[in-house]
Amino acid sequence: MEQSVQVCIAGGGPAGMMLGVLLARSGVSVAVFEKHADFLRDFRGDTIHPSTMQMLYELGWLNDFLKLPHQKVRTLTGVFGTKRIKFADFSHLPVKAPYIAMMPQWDFLNFLAAKGQAFPSFKLLMQTQAVDLVTDRGRVTGVRALCNGAEMVISADLVVAADGRGSTLRACAGLVPNDYGAPMDVEWFRLPRLAADTEETQARFDGGRIFIMLNRGDYWQCAFVIPKGRDAEIRAAGLAAFQASVAALLPIDTTRAAAISSWDQVYLLTVKVDRLQEWARPGLLFIGDAAHAMSPVGGVGVNRRVQDAVAAANLLTRPLRANALTFDDLKRVQARREFPTRMTQRLQLFLQNTVIAGSLAAAGPVAPPLALRVLTAIPLLRRLPARLIGLGIRPEHIAPR
């Protein structure tokens, strides 16, 4: 099978779907590849931040989006020993939805797919995986893909690799990101949440342990932060020992830790922070995790991927419509997004290497970091964490259609 579009996007995650929808909205013909048959997977990156919802508002889609089931997180709290610190209050942000919406990522992706299918130039190909690049005299001119086991070739003016931190197309292009390291991994699991629970989304820091609870309505999405590479050791110690470690950190009924009845309910997130030095080749652009894997610190990953997509659509729509796309146009996307990405990763690395690594190495009670005490003590600075988490550095906006 051979087909031709203006833009072929590998990866149906937040970056690929948002870019595909925005380009199709402006009349650019787009094919988005998603290797799975549907989006129904436990992504664990389920935080939709105010910056993303503001862009949905600018598109006129926010009201439709908020009709989907979600939970509103208006503040973030850190618990250090016996001291509680509210370190982010989103209610002051100058946006239409000043809170984090906790929503399964599959609902968000299905929402974008439905919006895209309203445009005649949008094509979503499920069970289709890009496996190689097609090149001509040093320029990428398309992709080879497997669609339900059959090989197909898609010719395109532009190929966008949005296929995640293990990007196949990045490997095909011979590119290797710079790895900045991480001192931790994360064990994800769920615990029952009762209507009587008064606790809200929070992070608890204790000697040698960090535990995060996200309010997901009828359950708690929990993250047990562990030192890097310790997953096998923890599992070898047995499920009962893991349950006891979780129970010791629960601010609710500790018997709920017994709901972890099998290791199959515990998912390992291997934390990575990396970034490509160059995000483009002639005819090829990398965005989202394919260009830069973010730490889970702050839960900003989904939203930074969406901002990459919006920036790319804003910068590339005009030259694509004019059939005049150049390599310089692709480099402008990196020029636009590299600074906020670099600054966000530096902040994440600072928090990883100080707050997180320090807590995991501590043998006794953990005190709130000095920087956090200063931020929460000075009224002028109290709103800074909410802006950094909720809006990010240099937030993007939807350009006129």
Image (spheres, helix red, strand yellow):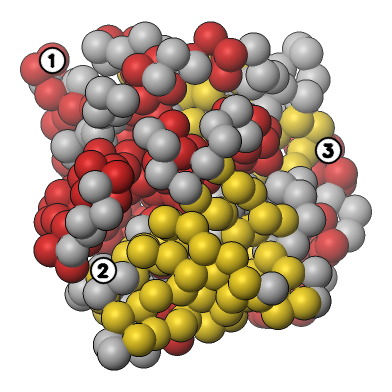
Please give the name of the residue rendered at 21% of the width and 20% of the height, measured from the top-left corner.
383
Mark 3, secondary structure of its residue: helix
Q: Is residue 345 visible?
A: yes
Which residue does the numbered mark 3 point to in the structure image?
255
Q: Quadrant of residue 321?
A: top left
The answer to whether any part of residue 306 appears in the image is: no
From this view, report whether residue 296 is shown above or below residue 77: below
Mark 2 closeness class: few <14, some 14–19, many ≥20 residues within 10 Å:
many
| Helix, strand or loop for disc 2 | loop
Residue 139 against residue 263 in the figure, above or below: below
On residue 279, the disc is 2
Instruction: Tally the numbered discs.
Output: 3
Query: What residue appears at the point 46 percent right and 39 percent down from the top-left corner?
Result: 24
Residue 65, horizontal then vertical, whole percent: 57, 19
Where residue 212 sits in the image (x, y, percent)?
A: 55, 42
- Relative horizontal placement of residue 394, taking residue 80 as reference (left or right): left
Could you say which quadrant of the image residue 176 lies in?
bottom left
Residue 282: x, y in percent?
Answer: 25, 74
What amino acid is labelled 1 in the image?
Pro
Quote the CA–CA distance across marks 2 and 1. 39 Å
Residue occupying the point 55% across, 42% down: 122
